[in-house]
Amino acid sequence: MSETEEMGETVAIESLPLDAWHRARGARMVEFAGYHMPIQYDGIMAEHLWTRDNAGLFDVSHMGQLVFSGEGAAEALEALVPGDISALKPGRMRYSLLLADDGGILDDLMITNTGHGLYMVVNGAVKWDDIAHLREHLPDEIEMNLLDEQALLALQGPKAAAALTALGVVPEFPNILPVDRLVFMQAGPYLWGDVRLGISRSGYTGEDGFEISVLASDVSALADALCAQEAVKPIGLGARDSLRLEAGLPLYGHDLDEGIDPVEGDLAFAISKRRREEGGFPGAARILGHLADGSPRKRVGLTVDGKMPVREGAKIFDGNSEVGVVTSGGFAPSVGAPIAMGYVPTGLSEPGTALAAEVRGKRVAVTVTPMPFVPHRYVRKQGG
Amino acid sequence: MPRFYTEEHEWIDVDGDVATVGITDFAQGQLGDIVFVEVPDTGAELSKGGDAAVVESVKAASDVYAPVDGTVTEGNGQLEEDPALVNSDPEGEGWFFRMTLSDKSQLDGLMNAQAYKDFIADL
């Protein structure tokens, strides 16, 4: 086992259930969030474009899968996140934010009402901090379990629904829709033979697709069966990052952190209507103030003149004044040009605003642009 | 025309007092899809081990170092239009820049083809 130095301690890098599976398929492995993870197989560009045209299989088992149960779990979580969790119907999910007392973002996450409890997926890099925060702040009668026996896969792309259907995945109960009849942000229990799968129509690439929770002991067989189909290839973290950047989706620890509130992060949609009226979430005064009067700064998309990538950390200038910073950026394979996102004063956040970014001492012209850079292709309605 | 290699995966072809510099096939394979190359300006003074060029893949920007001291005589303009040449022909059409050599004895510290092959086999 390889080891990495962190904060003066020696921390072991752990292996995920599909570790050998990735290596057998020629993945280049890197350390991420404390785990060995595949950064790429064939190449980031090819994997990115494959996902946009076909279906890509991502191993996201490093993410934390949590289940909350007990009387009043939804109300208890609402003290920590700004979403309307008590209105979440069984089989529905919602993007939300774990907030610090001052309204800063501790993590972004997904919450699903499974009908038996609330299932939450949090970022791998901060999952232990999240768990500590949640346990400290939730009442003792709310039970929280980390599903550390479960792996998590994401199947993303226009051919994802057909691939999952071809596998012979069926609803576990008669009142559950077939997987291809789910709409974006809907979830349910399914069976693949006698293997139980928790499936949601969701993901973080901007494409249609699914996230699949499965027992770690069954995940290799499932990944094999999916990748046996012509339309499905395994995709690494590199393309996951370029896909989400094109989709305008923020990455925690880069585009979002404890110093940024939901309005600054351009995530006001995650503050539900009832919660805006009632408040009662951490940092409500600051966040509701920013909603009413605007925040001093805002996350925006940037197109970049020329071919030189503008990356995380590049300073943003308005004339000679430094006004902001790039938080994610790189070459966008589906756009065919560099793109970026970053923070600028709200007065300079209108689409079309001409700014500059500094790369290696040189100024590059950038323009504020609405996101996403590549249109989302979520399935929001089912015909017929 | 002898070719030498550095531990930072640059190659240098020496022809009299002038040399051509690029990155190795191993290096391009490690970097993946190259999307941008910044070559030095003609006339730039380079010192051995110092920054000379930048190569950017989808994922990250990496520095390319000068293998020896000297002055840049030409950057490969083709890489501006077609940075993927570094992937397709790293040790040919995908060269980065040409330079004069101020001190040919610096070549003695570099690897030949066999030594470089052994070096990357151990990585």
Image (spheres, rainbow, N blue to C red):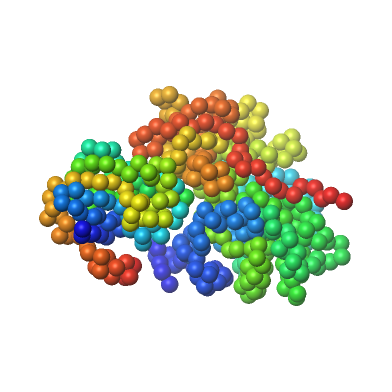
**Res. A358 image quadrant:** top left
Q: Quadrant of the N terminus of chain A?
A: bottom left
B17 up-or-down from A319: above or below: below
**Res. A375 image quadrant:** top right
**Residue B118: x and y, percent?**
28, 70
**Residue displayed at 20% across by 42% down:** B71
**Residue A303: x and y, percent?**
52, 36
Left-right relation of B11 to A164: left
**Res. A267 image quadrant:** top right
**Residue displayed at 75% across by 74% down:** A193
| Residue A323 visible to the viewer | no
**Residue displayed at 73% across by 51% down:** A185
Left-right relation of A278 to B123: right
| Of B3 and A199, the residue lying toward us | B3
**Residue A56: x and y, percent?**
62, 59
A13 up-or-down from B15: above or below: below
Left-right relation of B20 to A283: left
**Total numbered circles:** 0
**Residue displayed at 73% across by 68% down:** A167
Left-right relation of A324 to A201: left
B120 up-or-down from A372: above or below: below
| Residue B88 visible to the viewer | yes
